[in-house]
């Protein structure tokens, strides 16, 4: 884990108010794995904001990209950082996705901004495994395809792709999924992850999911990000340190 001042190299605005920020951070790009995250001090001077956690969306040489939409004060400041100013980033943090294992098809399941870690994931896995991508959103505005391939879309209002949620679309394609050795990798809203967990357990698919919660320190000191363990109901794991990626069987989602 390192703390560095990373220079801002570029801002990119994708469709539907999704932003990428490119940071020069060779100390991080050389060691980070898909699904790990950074805790970003968005502001030194405006007022003492807590750090904000962000998945690393992609890496390109010595640069990394974060993907975000403007939720509140922190992401607003991030979107307006001047080029060549620096941002204090702490990372890599947490456990990322385990790309190893006995599977030949990696199935990505991303809901809304849960797409953020998957460009880097896709780049890391696609020369070794077949990749199928399932992206869900409330409407087509929420479907983020950046950096992903072989995409199936589901929207709640039917404005793009399958009319329904992403787990219903997986169920519709069950025959195809069962004909392969798949491992599912997911990130998205908790209700989506909960439904996906049930789907994976019922159909005996291995599934790792990146979970989300409010965080402070980001590395296991403040105890502020508990998640219940299924292995031991009295034991809580920490999303920042033990996750954010968990085997869905191991945690109460
Ligand atoms: C491991 C991890 C990885 C993450 N990766 C990304 C990423 O790649 N891209 C990204 O955009 N976001 C990501 N997030 C969430 C991100 O940290 C929050 O969006 C960010 O903190 C918002 O900061 P803000 O100051 O703009 O909003 P705030 O001012 O902190 O919040 C504004 C509003 O958004 C709500 N809010 C804040 N955080 C969340 C959240 N996590 N879920 C739902 N509502 C929230 C608040 O309750 C409030 O109503 C991640 C979170 C975790 C735990
Ligand atoms: S955020 Fe501090 S322990 Fe997880």
Image (cartoon, rainbow, N blue to C red):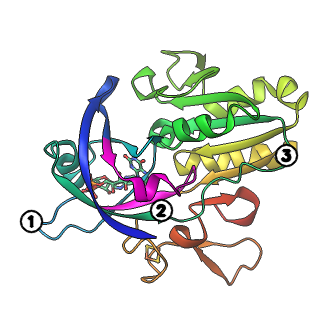
Which image quadrant is residue 175 in?
top right
Q: In the image shown, does 166 or 78 lie closer to the viewer?
A: 78
Tell which tag, 3 or 1, sits nearer the viewer.
Answer: 1
What's the mark number on residue 202? 3
User: Are circles 3 and 1 on residues that touch, CB within 8 Å?
Assistant: no
The numbered mark, 1 or 2, whose residue comes first in the sequence reads 1
Residue 65 x %, y %: 38, 42
Task: Characterize the local packing of mark 1: few (<14), some (14-19) or many (20 or more) Cα atoms within 10 angstroms.
Answer: few
Q: Residue at x 46, y 62 (%)?
A: 213
What's the mark number on residue 250? none
Reading the image, the residue beneath label 2 is 92
Residue 176 drawn above or below residue 93: above
The numbered mark, 3 or 1, whose residue comes first in the sequence reads 1
Residue 190 drawn above or below residue 250: above
Of helix, strand and loop, which one carries label 1?
loop
Q: Residue at x 46, y 42 (%)?
A: 59
Residue 218 x %, y %: 43, 71
Q: Quadrant of the C terminus?
A: bottom right
The numbered mark, 3 or 2, whose residue comes first in the sequence reads 2
Magenta span: 22-40
- Tell me the CA gap for discs 3 and 2: 34 Å
Residue 187 x %, y %: 57, 46
Reading the image, the residue beneath label 1 is 45
Q: In the image shown, does 87 or 61 lie closer to the viewer?
A: 61
Residue 229 x %, y %: 68, 73
Residue 178 drawn above or below residue 56: above
């Amino acid at each position: 884990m390192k703390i560095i001042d990373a220079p801002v190299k570029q801002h990119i605005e994708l469709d539907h108010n999704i932003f990428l920020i490119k940071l020069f951070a060779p100390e991080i790009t050389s060691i980070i794995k898909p699904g790990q995250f950074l805790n970003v001090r968005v502001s030194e001077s405006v007022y003492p904001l807590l750090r904000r956690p962000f998945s690393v969306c992609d890496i390109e040489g010595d640069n990394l990209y974060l993907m975000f939409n403007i939720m509140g004060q922190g992401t607003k400041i991030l979107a307006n950082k001047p080029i060549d100013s620096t941002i204090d980033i702490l990372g890599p943090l947490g456990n990322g996705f385990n790309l190893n294992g006995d599977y030949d098809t990696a199935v990505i399941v991303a809901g809304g901004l849960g797409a953020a870690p998957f460009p880097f994931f896709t780049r890391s896995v696609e020369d070794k495994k077949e990749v199928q991508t399932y992206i869900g959103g409330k409407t087509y505005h929420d479907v983020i395809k950046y950096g992903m391939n072989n995409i199936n879309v589901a929207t709640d209002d039917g404005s793009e792709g399958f009319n329904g949620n992403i787990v219903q679309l997986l169920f519709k394609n069950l025959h195809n999924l069962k004909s392969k050795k798949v491992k599912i990798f997911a990130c998205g809203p908790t209700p989506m992850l909960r439904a996906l967990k049930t789907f994976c357990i019922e159909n005996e698919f291995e599934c790792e999911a990146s979970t989300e919660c409010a965080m402070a320190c980001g590395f296991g000191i403040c105890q502020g990000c508990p998640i219940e363990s299924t292995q031991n109901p009295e034991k809580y794991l920490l999303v920042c340190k033990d996750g954010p990626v968990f085997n869905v069987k191991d945690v109460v989602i």
